[in-house]
Image (cartoon, rainbow, N blue to C red):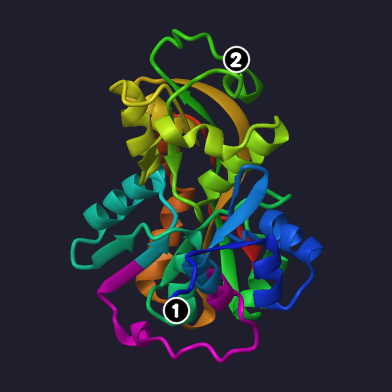
Amino acid sequence: MAGEKRFMDTQQVSDYLGINEKQVYTLIHDRGLPGTKITGKWLFPRHLVDRWLESNIANVPLVEPFLRDERDLLLIAGSDDPLFAKLITMFRTKNPDTVTLQSRAGSSDGLLALRKGLVHMACVHLMDPEGGYSTEYLRESLGEDIAVVNFAIRTQGLILQPGNPLRITGMEDAVVRPLRWGIREVGTGTRALMDRELDRFGTETVNILPSAIFTGAHLETALAVLTGKADIGVGIQAAAVMTGCSFVPIRQENFNLVIRKETYFLNQVQGFLSLLTEQGFRDLAEKLEGYETTQSGKILME
């Protein structure tokens, strides 16, 4: 629409969604509504709000997946993770005749692709009190006929230059310094974690934007810190370890796989999931560090 603003404030979002402002704050923290806090106010990119809304519409018939008859194809979309990328490589090695493709589109877009029947599984993690998408949230969004399988529990925190020359001890220590941050885009789970931590210690995102650089993945954040383009970033421990950066943990989170009933029992899907319980996968996780795999492969919702 001509003249339509790219960003909305809290009141505009409440009017847009037909809810009160208090409910908007609940959606931010409990349901992953994409927004960022600037000069004391929350701002919401309109296109991300629309995308979030589409992915959360309930009682819409799921599109019949074309994937059911594709026996030599495995399509995955969702959040970014280096251990997951290594698992895909392991699967390709063991299944050379299966074409395996991954889109690192983010959790919300991964679920949207799953709703539309465009992928076999979605990789999800978003900030909520439980540390990821709750099963109740997924039931509301996708219905009952889905399976949620734990991939791993991973550690998010501060990625710092090797040896931590600035002697940063945590987020509370970091927010009071004039640091150059590597930050993720609004709408990602890691950006939601960062914004929440900044808010918790009374610092607004706008204060760090002038010198910040935007990164598209955990490894990209770590490389920005390693090469001196940034002093600090928020990301997973594995990315810090892979680049030789220092790391200060903030919290753990669940990284889960969501699969629709129609494709759950396909050979390629079951073959992929079976790798989560193999020793080779646990060995990969141990080398990367920052992962807990005791629950890997466990069905959290069936």
Total labels drawn: 2
| Quarter the C terminus occupies | bottom right
Q: Which mark is residue 169?
A: 2
In the image, the segment drawn in magenta is: 52-75
Q: Residue at x 74, y 57 (%)?
A: 25
Q: Which mark is residue 118?
A: none
Above or below, comparing residue 15 to residue 221 in the picture: below
Residue 218 appears in the rendering: yes
Q: Which mark is residue 263?
A: 1
User: Whole-Å distance between the Cαs marked 1 and 2?
Assistant: 46 Å
Taking the image as shown, residue 220 lies to the left or right of residue 33, namely left
* 1 and 2 marks in contact (CB < 8 Å): no
Q: Residue at x 60, y 15 (%)?
A: 169
User: Of the residues shown, which amino acid type is indicated by label 2?
Assistant: Thr
Taking the image as shown, residue 20 lies to the left or right of residue 75, namely right
Q: Residue at x 58, y 70 (%)?
A: 147
Residue 63 within the segment the image draws in magenta: yes
Q: Residue at x 79, y 69 (%)?
A: 20
